[in-house]
């Protein structure tokens, strides 16, 4: 009997195809042109801002009460830079790129102008232009005398301002002076306020503005006769009894005659105002602290 023949399987098992090698995903090389473009953009932006602030408009914030009742502590405004021409003080940090004054024009009496402090501190100061070159100025019993004639001064309603964090009846120890000293601190409707006598002055060119009076003040209400020298202006604060201005020499905390070269620009419009209640970490307080009625006020 025959043995069955053993059958062998000659078919080979299928072989899995080898994977086709693929190149790793290409990584985008950091091009030098990328950061160079960024630097170019930032440089162009800085140039645009520099030109805008130097020759067109610049922001300014009110740090003191010397220009009450027109300007409050916490007001933010724009000043225009072309009204009086340009000098090195028109540029940020007073860069010495402009010799003398170019396109120079004198201010108008009654303008509210920003200028560099005569102390050399680089601080910006804001006051009202009262006297031009050649004018004579004197205070007699609280009355402004301009070129020998009394500037009309009419009593108007008292000026009342609420006591807020940036207009407190108590200031820091560095100042050692309250914003609202007695007897001007009072109460209206249960809210503490500061109340001052207020007058309306009208200059010979028809410019009118209100000034505050706290009563007799030695040295401020009665002064010597000043004659404004060429190339200078005489500046005063509207808060007449709380303003270190051209009535006082620099050595006594005043300004003396202000060189026209240091005048940077003219106040144009208030774009923001806050009573000091805002907190950076609480964004909603930025709106509750805003003094909306003061925004958009033109000069």
Image (cartoon, grey):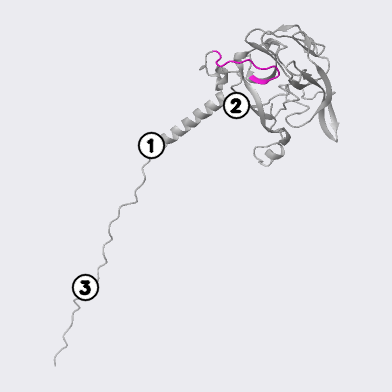
**Quadrant of the rendered structure where residue 225 is?**
top right
Q: Position of residue 264 (x, y in %)?
A: 61, 20
* Mark positioned earlier in the residue sequence (1 or 3): 3
Q: Quick check: can you spot residue 120?
A: no
Vertical placement of residue 129 versus 9, above or below: above
Badge 1 crowding class, 10 Å Cα cut-off, few under 14, some 14 to 19, many 20 or more, is few
Q: Which mark is residue 58?
A: 2
Label 1: state its secondary structure: helix
Q: Measured along the vertical axis of the image, is residue 181 above or below residue 136? A: below
Disc 1 versus disc 3: nearer the observer: 1
Tag 3 secondary structure: loop
Residue, x 26% and y 62% (percent of image)?
18
Residue that protrudes farthest toward the left in the picture:
2
Q: Is residue 107 magenta?
A: yes
- Looking at the image, is 48 positioned above or below residue 108? below
| Residue at the spot of label 1 | 33
Q: Residue 266: x, y in percent?
A: 64, 22
- Can residue 58 be seen in this snapshot? yes
The one nearer the camera, 250 or 70, is 70
Determine the main secondary structure of the stretch shown in magenta: loop
């Amino acid at each position: 009997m025959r043995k069955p023949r053993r059958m062998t399987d000659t078919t080979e098992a299928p072989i899995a195809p080898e994977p086709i090698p693929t190149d790793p995903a290409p990584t985008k090389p950091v091009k030098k042109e990328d950061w160079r473009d960024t630097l170019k953009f930032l440089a162009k932006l800085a140039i645009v801002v520099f030109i805008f602030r130097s020759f067109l408009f610049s922001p300014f914030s009110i740090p003191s009460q010397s220009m009450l009742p027109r300007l409050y502590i916490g007001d933010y405004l724009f000043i225009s830079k072309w009204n009086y021409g340009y000098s090195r003080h028109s540029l940020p940090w007073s860069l010495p790129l402009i010799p003398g004054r170019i396109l120079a024009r004198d201010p108008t009496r009654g303008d509210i102008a920003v200028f560099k402090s005569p102390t050399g501190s680089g601080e910006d100061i804001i006051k009202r232009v009262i006297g031009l070159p050649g004018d004579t100025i004197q205070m007699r019993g609280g009355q402004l005398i301009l070129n020998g004639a009394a500037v009309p001064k009419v009593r108007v309603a008292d000026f009342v301002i609420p006591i807020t964090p940036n207009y407190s009846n108590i200031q820091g120890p560095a100042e050692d002076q309250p914003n609202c000293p007695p007897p001007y601190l009072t109460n209206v409707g249960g809210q503490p306020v500061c109340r001052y006598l207020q007058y309306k002055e009208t200059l010979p060119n028809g410019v009118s503005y209100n000034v505050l009076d706290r009563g007799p003040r030695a040295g401020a209400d009665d002064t010597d006769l000043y004659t404004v020298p060429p190339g200078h202006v005489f500046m005063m604060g509207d808060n007449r009894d709380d303003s270190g201005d051209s009535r006082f020499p620099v050595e006594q905390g005043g300004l003396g005659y202000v060189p026209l070269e240091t005048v940077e620009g003219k106040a144009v419009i208030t774009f923001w105002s806050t009573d000091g209640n805002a907190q950076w970490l609480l964004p909603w307080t930025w709106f509750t602290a805003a003094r909306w009625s003061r925004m958009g006020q033109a000069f």
